[in-house]
């Protein structure tokens, strides 16, 4: 057989295999579609009559007065309707309830057939896809349904308008749940297996032909390459950790400064473009033998290969400085960035690659604490300082090892407690670390948002369990412009909001004063009281005073603790107290550490204070024993 014939036969074989594969794919994908259609029709038939009967029951018992008002305020009618609707509950129909839209556009429970307690007027928070369906039900006055498919069950949720006088008064929601229809699955599975067996032999030939190429090239590349930046990912690190010669590499950790603020301000798409741009910059300015790994969200690990004659690490430091300068020059749509770098020049002394990386990581966050936009070099004394690394903070936050201690704010005349300030702590190596030990290294990262969310959730839990508790929570300006945080706060009940004060931490990183002011106004309108924290020690004091509707002003502890001994601070505090009276704010003194400070504060007629003289920050159990029992 000549070469032309071989080529022709090979082409025929490929065409035949591709055609067989197409037929197989078509038949194989057709079966699930048919299965789903059959299941859909059976479910529809078995549920439609029930839904019509439920709706008929409601219409048959429709009151002459407004339906919502009657259900809410007529207990006899509500009980009768609940009893009649409960008749329809079965193993398949497990939930029937009614909701309505209040005058603010929020959805609330009207009646729940399965709830033992009274759920009237409780807030109903629909999922995103549910909200769209509910809006269509209200506007179009027609029912909708949504099918949920899980491994062993099929579910269908009906949304049926309750119409009175040609107006949608409420929405009936009914949840059906079906065990997977085994008979259908058995039939379809038999057909599927027959097709699979008959065509599978042919497909196997093609599969064997491409298997090794796909396994050895494409899959390996996909497993090791970060899909966004095109550099290596953590999988590659795991693969080389035990084989990399640490004598030949220097470990360098690079983190983009304030990357979370870039994401929050310009959006995740811009953030992704910046990550891709930085990765491209690194690849351009490093050699092929250097290893670049995307270690975290905005963090890159670089393993610089040493030169044969490099003994003093001068070249490695020059590379690090070059990278830092190139990043300073980097621009994306007029957005400039900086980076912090931690470098471990003594990787050969490490117990392994991960230990070498940990030391570079510790040094990186020393650079961030020192002000960012710089290079720090690892020293053996670093680990003795007890620094916590970003990786360790991340592990703590992921495990939700976040708690709050509470310190009372006290009436300086009567000694009664106005409220307790919530002070966050994380558990690390058997100790509780205050924010000063870890907050700086997570600012500007996604961990900061997760941490804030955990703190809020912890405090809400304590408020629910301790009705006597009145608290304040510390939030930074970035928290006030975060819509997710705002939604959590605004979704709370009025009685909960009245027990919470929000302390605005005074920091420099305020990028959008307009949004900050607007969101704080939304919170005060909802009932939250605002406290300006650390007044007298910051950069934007007078903006906060003039623009933020705060009820309380906390005078910074660095001022308070000096007033018994320093006349300048005493006079400053006296003027601040008079100024607070003029602008109708209530001053609170921080750092009340001894009786001498307390007496001076009373002389200055400052009404409230907090500090170690009254109580150290304590866990909630100790607070309960000391103040509530």
Image (cartoon, grey):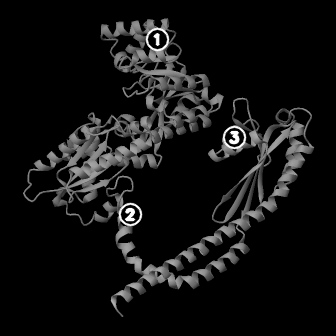
Q: Is disc 1 in contact with disc 3, using a CB cutoff of under 8 Å?
A: no
Reading the image, the residue beneath label 1 is 606
Q: CA distance from mark 1 to mark 2?
A: 65 Å
Q: Secondary structure at mark 2?
A: helix
Residue 170 drawn above or below residue 512: below
User: Which SS class for mark 3?
Assistant: loop
Q: Which residue is mark 2?
A: 222
Q: Position of residue 288 (x, y in %)?
A: 21, 59
Q: Nearer the viewer, mark 1 or mark 3?
A: 3
Give the residue drawn at x 72%, y 37%: 108
Crowd class of label 3 (few under 14; some 14 to 19; many from 20; radius 10 Å): some
Residue sitting at the far bottom: 1
The answer to whether 371 appears left or right of 516 in the picture is left
In x, y percent, where is residue 345?
17, 51
Q: Earlier in the sequence, mark 2 or mark 3?
A: 3
Quarter of the figure that contains the N terminus:
bottom left
Percent across and percent down for residue 488 are 57, 36
Circles 1, 2 touching at the beta carbon (< 8 Å) = no
Residue 491 in the image: above or below residue 81: above
The residue at which mark 3 appears reads as: 124
Is residue 211 in view? yes
Give residue 390's quadrant in the image.
Answer: top left
**Disc 2/disc 3 C-alpha distance (Å):** 43 Å
């Amino acid at each position: 057989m000549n070469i032309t014939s071989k080529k022709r036969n090979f082409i025929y074989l490929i065409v035949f295999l591709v055609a067989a594969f197409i037929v197989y794919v078509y038949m194989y994908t057709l079966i699930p579609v048919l299965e789903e259609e059959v299941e859909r029709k059976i479910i529809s038939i078995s549920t439609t009559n029930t839904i019509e009967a439920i709706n008929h029951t409601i219409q048959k018992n429709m009151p002459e007065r407004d339906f919502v008002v009657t259900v809410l305020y007529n207990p006899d009618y509500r009980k009768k309707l609940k009893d009649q609707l409960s008749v329809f509950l079965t193993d398949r129909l497990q939930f029937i309830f009614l909701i309505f839209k209040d005058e603010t556009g929020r959805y609330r429970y009207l009646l729940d057939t399965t709830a033992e307690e009274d759920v009237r007027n409780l807030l109903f928070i629909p999922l995103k896809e549910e909200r769209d369906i509910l809006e269509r039900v209200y506007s179009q006055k027609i029912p909708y349904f949504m099918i949920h498919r899980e491994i062993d069950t099929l579910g269908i949720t009906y949304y049926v308008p309750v119409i009175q006088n040609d107006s949608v008064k409420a929405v009936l929601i009914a949840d059906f749940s079906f065990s997977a229809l085994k008979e259908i699955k058995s039939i379809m599975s038999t057909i599927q297996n027959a097709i699979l067996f008959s065509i599978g032999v042919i497909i196997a030939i093609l599969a064997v032909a491409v298997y090794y190429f796909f396994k050895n090239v494409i899959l390996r590349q996909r497993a090791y390459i970060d899909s966004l930046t095109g550099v290596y990912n953590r999988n590659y690190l795991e693969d080389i950790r035990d084989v990399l010669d640490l004598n030949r590499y220097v470990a360098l950790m690079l983190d983009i400064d304030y990357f979370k603020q870039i994401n929050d301000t310009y959006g995740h798409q811009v953030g992704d473009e910046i990550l891709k741009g930085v990765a491209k910059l690194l690849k351009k300015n490093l050699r092929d033998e250097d290893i670049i790994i995307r270690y975290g969200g905005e963090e890159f690990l670089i393993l610089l290969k040493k030169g044969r004659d490099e003994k003093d690490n001068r070249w490695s430091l020059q590379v690090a400085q070059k990278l830092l300068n190139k990043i300073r020059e980097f621009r994306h749509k007029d957005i400039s960035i900086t980076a912090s770098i931690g470098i471990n020049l003594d990787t050969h002394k490490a117990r392994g690659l991960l230990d070498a990386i940990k030391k570079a990581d510790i040094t990186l966050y020393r650079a961030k604490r020192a002000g960012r936009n710089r290079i720090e070099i690892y020293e053996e004394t670093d680990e003795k300082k007890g620094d916590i690394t970003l990786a360790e903070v991340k592990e703590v936050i992921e495990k939700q090892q976040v708690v709050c201690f509470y310190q009372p704010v006290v009436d300086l005349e009567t000694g009664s407690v106005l409220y307790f300030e919530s002070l966050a702590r994380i558990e690390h190596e058997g100790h509780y670390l205050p924010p000063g030990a870890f907050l700086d290294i997570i600012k500007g990262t996604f961990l900061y948002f997760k941490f804030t969310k955990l703190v809020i959730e912890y405090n809400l839990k304590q408020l629910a369990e301790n009705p006597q508790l009145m608290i304040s929570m510390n939030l930074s300006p970035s928290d006030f412009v975060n819509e997710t945080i705002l939604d959590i706060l605004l979704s709370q009940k009025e009685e909960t909001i009245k027990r919470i004060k929000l302390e605005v931490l005074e920091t420099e990183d305020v990028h959008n004063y307009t949004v900050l002011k607007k969101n704080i106004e939304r919170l005060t309108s909802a009932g939250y009281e605002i406290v300006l924290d650390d007044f007298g020690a910051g950069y934007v004091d007078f903006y906060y005073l003039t623009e933020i509707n705060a009820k309380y002003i906390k005078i910074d502890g660095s001022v308070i603790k000096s007033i018994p001994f320093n006349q300048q601070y005493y006079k400053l505090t006296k003027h601040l107290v008079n100024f607070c009276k003029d602008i109708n704010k209530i001053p609170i003194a921080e750092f009340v550490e001894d009786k001498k400070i307390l007496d001076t504060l009373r002389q200055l007629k400052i009404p409230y204070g907090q500090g170690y003289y009254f109580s150290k920050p304590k866990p909630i159990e100790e607070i309960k024993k000391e103040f509530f029992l």
